[in-house]
Amino acid sequence: MKNLLVLPFNIDHAQKSGEFAKILYEARKSGELIVNERPIIINDAKLFAQTDSEANISFFVTSDSRSLSIFESLENKINPNFSIIDINIDHTEIFGLLDL
């Protein structure tokens, strides 16, 4: 936990969250995104907005398969400033191995 930083949700994050939520709700309405629970979209939009808004954050780590599908839907419309990492995938598959 020493490498974990909790960020306060600020106005830049809120504005970006609104943009993301609009994209995701439109994807849900068109049938491109299948999510039954409305709070999931807005919660993920907020988290993704914080990640996208911070220049020093490159990755969003999750084990939630719903978040992965929401990110894919978002990624189809825009080019987020971060990559998502599924914690269920071994880190060597994502980052490779150091040749020591």
Image (tube, grey):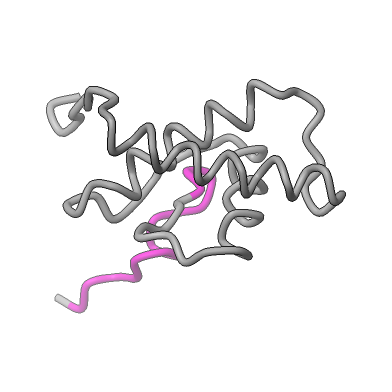
The answer to which quarter of the image holds residue 24 is top right
Residue at 45%, 51% (x, y): give it: 85
Q: Which residues are magenta?
A: 86-99
Q: Is residue 49 left or right of residue 33?
A: left
Q: Position of residue 56 (x, y in %)?
A: 17, 52
Which one is in front, 12 or 74? 12
Q: Position of residue 44 (x, y in %)?
A: 53, 34
Which one is in front, 80 or 96? 80
Residue 93 belongs to the span the image colors magenta: yes
- Please identify the quadrant where the C terminus is shown: bottom left
Residue at 51%, 37% (x, y): give it: 45
- Please identify the quadrant where the N terminus is shown: top left
Residue at 45%, 32% (x, y): give it: 46
* Looking at the image, residue 77 lies above or below residue 41: below
* Looking at the image, residue 77 lies above or below residue 3: below
Of all residues shown, which one is farthest toward the bottom? Answer: 99
Q: Is residue 65 left or right of residue 35?
A: left
Q: Position of residue 37 (x, y in %)?
A: 75, 23
Q: Is residue 69 left or right of residue 12?
A: right
* Looking at the image, residue 31 lies above or below residue 67: below
The answer to which quarter of the image holds residue 80 is bottom left
Badge count: 0
Which one is in front, 82 or 10? 10
Q: Is residue 77 left or right of residue 54?
A: right
Q: Position of residue 67 (x, y in %)?
A: 59, 39
Residue at 54%, 37% (x, y): give it: 63
* Looking at the image, residue 38 lies above or below residue 87: above
